[in-house]
Each structure stands twice: as structure tokens, then as C-alpha cells.
Image (tube, rainbow, N blue to C red):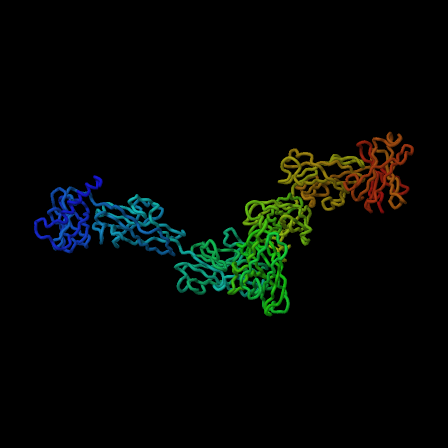
Amino acid sequence: MSSRCSRLLLLVLPLLAVACSDDPDGGTPPSGTPPTVREVQPTGGPIAGNTLINVYGSGFQDGAKVFLGEHEVQRTVVVNAFRLYGYTPTATSGRVDVRVVNPGGEYGVLVRGFAFDGPPAPRIDQAGVSGGNRELISGGQPVDALVTGEVNVAGVTRGVGQGGGVLAQVGFAPGEANLLDMASYTWEAATYLEDSNTREADVYQGNVQLQAPIEQERREWAVTLRFSIDGGQTWVLTDGDGMANGLSAQMMRRVFIARPKVDYCKLGPDSNRSSLDLFYKPAETVLLKVVGQVYAAGLTPGSGAGSGVQAQLGFGPPDSDPNDAAVTGWTWVSATYKTDIGNNDEFEAELPNPATLGQYRVAMRFSISKDVWRMCDVDGVNDSLTGELTYSPNKLGILTVANEPPKPAVTWCKIGEDQKNDPEVVNYLTTQTTGFKTVYANVNLPGVTDKPGAGPGLTGQLGWGPKNEDPRTSTVWNWSTQLTWNKDNFSVNDEFKAVLPNPAVNGEYRYAVRFSANGGPVRVCDHNGTDSGNQAFELDKLGVLNVTGEVVLPRVVGYCKLGPDQNNTPESVTYFTTTVPSRKIVGQVYVLGATPGAGAGPGVVGQLGWGLAGTDPATWNWQTAGTYKGEIGSNDEFEATLPNPGTVGSFRFAYRFQANGGAFLYCDADGNSGGETGFEASKTGTLTVEEPAPVVGVCRLQSVSGTTVGSGDAVTAVGRVRIPGVTNGNGAGANLQVQMGVGAADVDASTSATSFTWAPATYSREAEGEADTDEFTLDLRPGYTGSRAVSMRYSTNGTTWFYCDKDGSDVGGYTLGQQHALTVGNHAGIDYCRLQWPLKISDLTGNRTVYGFIFEDGVTNAPPPATTLTAELGYGPKEQDPGVSTAWTWLAGTVQSDTGNDDEYRADMPVTAPVGSSYVWRYRVGTGPYCFGDWQPEGQPGGSANGLSPDTLGTVDQ
């Protein structure tokens, strides 16, 4: 035994001796069991006495007395066998024994248990608020909140009953206040409730009344207790984990009061959770009544309408989500309370008729708080994040406005032969090419399948897809396998069949069938049978397909779509013929074993194609490759720039995808998973190409270098154009075309433009003295003689022209008097030239050779050919001046003969020259003016000597 243990034993033995010895006065010891004294609180007090003490032990009997040394404790109260209390007598300073004596004389002693030398005052050792934070609901009325807490004061609260001298108060403060400052709280008295489970502490409680939120949706309050043991002179504040470890604002207990909210709502009758299909004719005036249910805790349970509940019925565009605050185009009408359904309230409203052909989505929404709505679908919505009761825009009602009601869905259908309701398991190898499973299916539609043979208008497909995808909504199921009629079954059903394809990619799949009638809604079926009533569709009742074996490259495109995700409306694009292509078009594709996972699926090819509306997409232009853009779930998204055909017209565009050289799958805006109606040309994009709208500005025929000129000689025309946003800055304005024209002096070019001959002018500079103005020039060499006029025009789209005269288009518009007058006289550069022979091509036999004649002193005197002489035969429309028009074609002539001082030239008229064209010879020495040689009627002087006229040209008549 250690020395420490020895000392302990020596100390304990005398105590045991005192407690168990005979009566100290030498009398006979009492026969009863003596009490035991274990503790006194406090352990000391002033010698003046009157200190409240609690004595703890066991075996205390009613009438027991307590002695501190030789002095009896005053006003002793025996609480129970384990505790008594009283007030100390006056005494002298020193430590004394505490002795409890029962009425029978039995006693127990705590040696030196109390000191009369000024012990420490009682203190609060621990105090805290019970429970956690709370969420309460109020429609605006104040809320009562009961606050409970414990306090532990050594020597005071221990044992049964209320500890003496303890005061308690309950308080509340706004959540945003300084919660560690007792002045932030409103205080009221709290009352003793009970002892704690350990009997070391006393439990107090108090009630506070808290104001509910008025404008805001939620209000926060802090609640607490505080305690005092000195008559309220000082207080100890409490928090949720007790004040002994310090106070923290975060640990203060809160009460959150919210306005009532919609906990659950549903569109449509309580008994219908599958679909809500509605129909109007455009002129229908009898409106449909649509119902919906709502549950709000504390409001809708009980009879009558829940206080403050608002309901609205609405309709909107078919691909829009009314729960998206950014969506517009929805119309809402108020619904009114109809009846109670259990704890729910049912509301009803008349659905307006949009009166415009098309499909619309229908929704109902409920609110209790201002402008806070819960949107409802047909299978119900609550706060769930997964499962059936999550909101989905795809589960809203459908309103069809049409001249005829929409086609009905098939009544019932199932996978497998009749009476076989358990899912069948099919096993394939990836490389398997034969021995595939034939899958049977049954379908019922009264009036259709109860007739002999295949029900008219029925179509069905056998599909397969990943095991975790719902075939009713999944975009990755493959429905390309058509079901074919097999036989009549029990005279009311039709049985169909098809061979289940091999996905050829390792994995576990599910297979199912689906049917529609006359293009109506599609119903997907399981092995147990599916209808709109009690036989709901079950995912675990689908067929099972397992594919195992060596890995092979996927070659089947399971699904593809044109356009952005979640948007089934075909895109419309408008280009001008001059537009630089810039519109990005996206598409997405799913290929089992390729597109799932990050990055572009290997071997997947996407193409963006376009073609004339109404043509077979297979014949379109598919030269634009799509590039991988990113992931959309298990799909890959591609992107490409839509080309500009460059010609006016209406076109269509779409995507197509291919995997590892397999077949292309064509894609429309609502997606294609195969099947005969998977791709619809009416759901491809629309591309409209138009001529650009002309841009209007100000223009002026600035100058013409002369008023008289010889035929074939040059005159320079200068013009200016100012168009905001086009001619700004250096260089010619984008798409700006300027032309100079020559025509008859008495003809207005702006109203008879075809009577003028127009030629393109070229940009020369930015106009001096005129900001943002382009200047253009052209050397005109008019051939036709007589009184002529010069005009100018411009265009920004090549189709619409604006005409310019000398005082400018902004001064009185265009007038005949402001055209530039130009007299074109006889040619003066070359002595003489003319069209020799023939006057028309039909005058020739066996050839198409045309001859021309020229005399120029000092040039044709010498043996031909003269190196400085140019001789050309031209043909073109006689309405166009051959000296100005770009519509004339010129052919080089060769020397035919040298006659005296004259030279004769020849050239062959091409057989491609248009019948009805005119022809003429032109000659030129060096860079001098052209001499145009025509013919004249017999007996008159001809050629250039008397000018040039459109009536005296040769004629291509064959």
C-alpha cells in the first residue's frame, strides 16, 4: 500500500469511529438507523447567522434537528429524507461539525463541515435555454412562444423543489439586435416549473408574444432567460449551450416566423394524375372549367376556403415554362374556391379560349404571400427535389385549339403476348447478327382494334434504351424499329411484333413498345399493361436486354435534335443576299457508347444542311461540318454557322448525324429517335433570303467636263454620295454602287431608266469640303449622236436605285431640267469609217463574215496593218449606246484588203450572238477617240460622216 493510501485510511478511520461509536454521554445507543450527513451548502457563513443552508444526506426524518457545533439551526425544514434546510444561529468564528439528530435520537455527523468565518456568497454555476431554434407560421397575428430553461446554483437548486432566492425572467429581441446586450430584450417574469432530471438544477419557463411578419416573408426573433440570486440587483444572461462556457450570439435561440406558404398543389381533378388534355374550336364560346387543389398547413384543413389563399388558371406558349420569371406571353385568370377535398381546398376557373389555332400549355398556380406563387402540374408539386412531386413544365396541361378535336390515344397496350405479364430477359452478344428475339405487343382501341385485321391508322414502334432512362420522356431511346401487325387477339385487341435490334454495345438496357392512332398521342407500354386508369406505367415492368462480348464501334445514332436544348420551336433566320453568314446553329446527338462522358464522342459526325423549301433533305447542301461544342447530359452538342445561299428565296435547314460510317439520322426541332414520324420537314429551321433594304442618302451629279463632244470621244462625269453610316470614313461605302448614264435629252432618267445607258463609276476620293461624302468618276464615250443628257444614280443593294441631278437630290428632288445637257456631234478624230457589208447576217450564205471600212490619212495610206490602229466588230442591244454600255461584246478584226488609201477589215460573227442583237464597227488610232461605223440607206452618205444612229446598225437576225 502506498503512503498516500495509508494517509487516507488514517483520516477515514476516526470519522467512522465518531459515526458508529456509542452515545458520547455514555448512555445506551439508540436502536434506530442513524442518518448520514454528506454535504452542506454553503460551507460557511457569517457569525451573525441567518444564513440559509441546505444539508444533504439520507435518513432524515420529520422533526429532525440540525446542530452546527453546539448551536441548533433555526427554522429547520425537512424537505425529504435526503435534504433539509434552515438558518444558521449566531456563533463564534471557527469550523464546526454539522450534526443531524432524528426524533429517536439517532444522529449523523459531518466533521468540521461548516465554518463561521465569512464563506463566499452563493453564485450561479450554470444556466441555459432548452431546445433548439423554431419555425412558426402566422398569417399576421402575433405568435405565443413558450421559452424554457434551467439554472444551477450550488447549494440552492439541488434536490427536490424550488431553490430559494432564485429569480427568473424570459426575454425576446429582434434577431438583428445586439443579442449579448440585455438592454436589447423585452423582459417578463418566468416561473418555476420543475426540477431537472438530475435534481441539480431548477427548470423555469415563460411565455413571450412575438410579432408576425407584415411585408417581409420571414421574421427572426431571439428568445432567452436570465436569472438572479441577489434580489434582481444583478442578472446572468443565458444562451443555448449554457453560460458557463461564455455567451455567443450564434448560440442564442431563435424563433423564425414565416407567412403561410403553399405546401402542395395540383392541376386537374384529384383522381387524374396522368395528363390534362383540353380542346377548343377557334370560335367556341362555352368555356371549360378547370380545377386544381392546394394544401397549406394551418389554412386549408377544415371546412371552407383557407384564409388568404389565391388561385389563378393560365395558358401560354407550348414550349414555355410559366415558372420562369423571364417568360412572357401567359394569360392568367382568377380561380375561386369550390370545395374541400380532405385537407386540401379545390379551386375552379373557366379557361379562356385563345381563339388562335395551335397548342398551348395550361397551368394553375397558388399563393398566400404577396407575389409568391407555387406553380402546379398534373401529378402534384411540393418541396421535393426529386421524384414525382417535383415540378416539371412537361407535366402541365395541354390545350389544343383546332377545327377538329385532337386524335385520341390508344386505350391500352402492353409488351408481350396476352397473359404474359412478367418482363422477359433477352441476352445478345455485341457481335451477334442472327438469332434475334421477336417481341410481341398488344394494343386496344375501341372501334379500331375490334375489327378484323390490322386496326386502321394504328402505328407502333419497338424501342430500346439505357436501363435508367424513362422511355416516355428520354431523348436517348431508339424507336426506329416499326411494329407490324401479327393477328387479332380475343377479337378486341391487335397483336403486333418486331425483331429486337442489337445495340452492339456492352451494357444493360430496357425495351418497350409504343402505339399511336392516326397521328394522335403516343402511349408507351410495359409488360403489365398501361392505360389512363388503374394500370399505370411501371419502369420495373419493361423488358430487359443484356449485351455482352467484345467491344465494337457504335454505328447507330439513337437520337438527335436541331436547335437549343429544351426549345422545340424551329428557328427562323433571315439573311440579305449581301449578308456575311454569322448565325450559329446548334444541334445535339446521342450515340450509345460514344457521346456519354466528357468530350466529343469518337466517330460522331455532324453536318448542317440547307436546301429549298419543299425539297428532299437528302438533296440539300451538306457541306457545312458541325464542330463539337459541349455536353448536354449524355448528348454531345455541335455548332456550325448557317451559310448564306446568296439568292433570294425560302430555304430550310437541319442537322444530320452519323456514327462511324453508319446511316445518317436527320434531326428536326423536337428531336428524332427514329420511327416513321421521327423527322418532320415542317419542324426544320426556316431561312429566308431577301434583298437588303436600300439605304437613302443625298447625291449630286457634281460636274461633267463638257457640253459638246464628238461621237466616241471622252467626257468625264463626277458625282458625290453621302449616306449616314455608309460613306463615313475613308474609302468607298460598303455595298455602295454608283453609275453614270447617257440618254435622250428629253427623257427623265429617274422615271425611264431603261432609256438610258448606264455604266459603273469608280470611287476616286473623299469629297473635298463635304464630310462623310464619297466622290465617284467615269469617262463616258457616247457613240450615238444628237441631243443627249447625262445622269447619275446609286444603290446599296443593287436593286433599288436613287437618282441624282446637278443641284442634288436634296434640292427639289430629281428634275429633267437638272440633267446635264450634252450634244454629241459627228466623230472628228478619224477621217471616215463605216460598216461595209452585210447589213444583216441573213444576207450571207455559208459564212458569218462582217466587213468594215476605214480611212485615216497618214495611217491607212501605208500597207496594212497599221500598228497603231485598232479595229473591232461589236454586237449588243441597240437600245444601249455602244460607246457607253458594258452589255456590248467586241471582237478584234483582221485586215481583209488594202484599197487605195482605205483599209478593209473582217471578223466572223459568233453563232452565239443573240438573235435580235445589233452590230457595228469601231476604230481607234492609239488612245484616241473611237470612230463608230454604221451604214446608211442607199443614196445617202453613210458611215461616221453623218453621225451614229441605233437605226443604222447591222442586225443579227439568224
> Is residue 531 toward the left or the right of residue 762 in the image?
left
Residue 189 image position (x, y, % from top left): 26, 52
Tally of numbered tags: 0
Q: Nearer the viewer, residue 163 or 934?
A: 163
Residue 548 image position (x, y, % from top left): 57, 52
- The N terminus, quarter of image: top left
Residue 464 image position (x, y, % from top left): 58, 56
530 w.r.t. 829: above or below: below
Q: Nearer the viewer, residue 944 or 920?
A: 920
Q: Nearer the viewer, residue 624 or 475?
A: 475
> Is residue 912 toward the left or the right of residue 108 in the image?
right
> Is residue 305 toward the left or the right of residue 861 in the image?
left
Residue 581 seen by the camera:
yes
> Is residue 752 toward the left or the right of residue 183 in the image?
right
Residue 317 seen by the camera:
no
Q: Which residue is the extreme one toward the left?
A: 26
304 w.r.t. 575: above or below: below
Residue sitting at x 90%, y 35%: 897
Residue 325 image position (x, y, % from top left): 50, 51
339 w.r.t. 56: above or below: below
Q: Which residue is the extreme one toward the right?
A: 900
Q: Nearer the viewer, residue 538 or 397?
A: 538
